[in-house]
Amino acid sequence: MRSPTPYHDEVRDTELYRQLLGLEKPWTVDRVELDVKQQRVDVWATHDKPKAWPCPECGKDCGLHDHNEERTWRHLDSCAFLTHLHARVPRVRCAEHGVRQVRVPWAEPMSRFTALFERLAIDVLLETSISGATNILGLSWDEAHHLMERAVARGLARRPHAAPRHMGIDEKAIAKGHRYVTMVCDLDEGHVLEVAEDRTAASLTQCLGQFSMNDLAEVEAFAMDMWEPYAQTLRRYVDDIDTKIVFDRFHIVKHMNEAVDLVRRQENKALRADGDDRLVGTKYLWLYGEENLPTDRLELETRMRFAALRSSNLKTARAWALKESLRDLWSQRSRAAGERWWQRWYSWAIRSRLEPVKKVAGMVKRHLPNVLTYFKHRVTNAGSEALNSVIQMLKKRAFGYRSFQNFRTVILFRCGGLNLYPEAHLKPG
Ligand SMILES: [Zn+2]
């Protein structure tokens, strides 16, 4: 008579975890402890006695020296049970590199997580906020942040150092305009390449530090604001820079938006002194491009009111029309057409008797050659994916980040286009 072979006798929990962890010779699972009360699984890995272990530096076969103290790695949960892997890692004595701890197949050196756990954590962190991820993964804020730092360092080490064809340079106000960061982007890929504190020449130099002069010489165009410290910095590092700088649409329209807002504020003040409330509460309406008015979200009454304001003889309406019109500069077909178009707009703007608008017109005129370089390179930060994603992040979180370095980590983690995953791979069982 055949003896019954109950399931738990055939597939032991040690074999199950060996397979789940994808452990291969010489590694195997020694024992598994399940603590139902604590909702915890602990797995101990061990090894049989191979003739030699590879040195982690040179890969040369070496003899076993000794074992380190037991270490613990957080692994993927087993159902809802927190799961930890424990092992004493062998050390080898390499003739060239001395006594070294061997590499384990389930984790990167120094990590407190298995590679599979890190992959999951990275995926979760990419999808949610840090605090959301800490809840889902059962990690502390520091653990989650450290995991992101390691992922970013890994990604940066793997990134090719060639500079992008089209580079976007931008300054962003953080903490309500009291502080700035400088950001360098790959406009073709839509990735943030680096961020640095402040918006000085030194900030940009720091961002460009990762590239060689030869790499920078390969960049065809730099889209940026009319900001002298940046232009001077580029002049120092790049030959023929005056053919490559594009003072771009995004920044010029931003200056015009600020001018419109200034006109509106002054006019609103004057009108209200006469008991005229027409401009009250209209700030954001004037900032939209004509075609971007969120008509689906605006009540009919607001839309009609704004239409009436636009066609009124208010100064704000004139400033707005000038701003809207200026945007056509970039749809001209050639540099020559662009230049002619600009002359007409400029004489209109300069006769507008709107001081903030005249100021922007003068600034653009002084920088005109490098505004018109647009017609050669056709680049702009407007619509830049990298820029937009950072703006969205800045909007969502009004600076809980403890320091600039943390902020940089988060930006590069989310917007850097980096290969973040750990190298050590556990093959699925
Ligand atoms: Zn070695």
Image: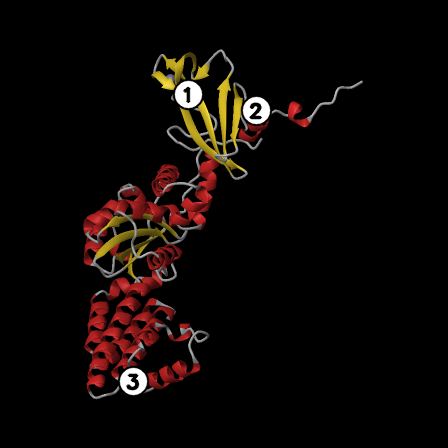
Of all residues, the one furthest to the front in this rendering is 37
Residue at the image point whose x is 29% and y is 54% from the top: 399
Quadrant assignment for ligand 1: top left
The image quadrant of residue 176 is bottom left
Secondary structure of residue under mark 3: loop
Q: Which mark is residue 14?
A: 2
On the question of residue 352 being in view, the answer is no
Pair 3/2: label in front? 2
Instruction: Give the image quarter of residue 295.
Output: bottom left
First along the sequence among labels 3 and 1: 1
Please state which amino acid type lies under the numbered disc 1: Val
Q: Residue type at mark 2?
A: Thr
The image position of residue 404, as x and y in percent, is 26, 47
Q: What residue is disc 1 on?
A: 102
Give the residue drawn at x 49%, y 19%: 46
Foreground pick, 204 / 72: 72
Q: Nearer the viewer, residue 34 or 74?
A: 34
Residue 298: in sight, yes or no?
yes
The answer to whether the beta carbon of the residue marked 3 is less than 8 Å from any atom of ligand 1 is no
Label 1 SS: loop
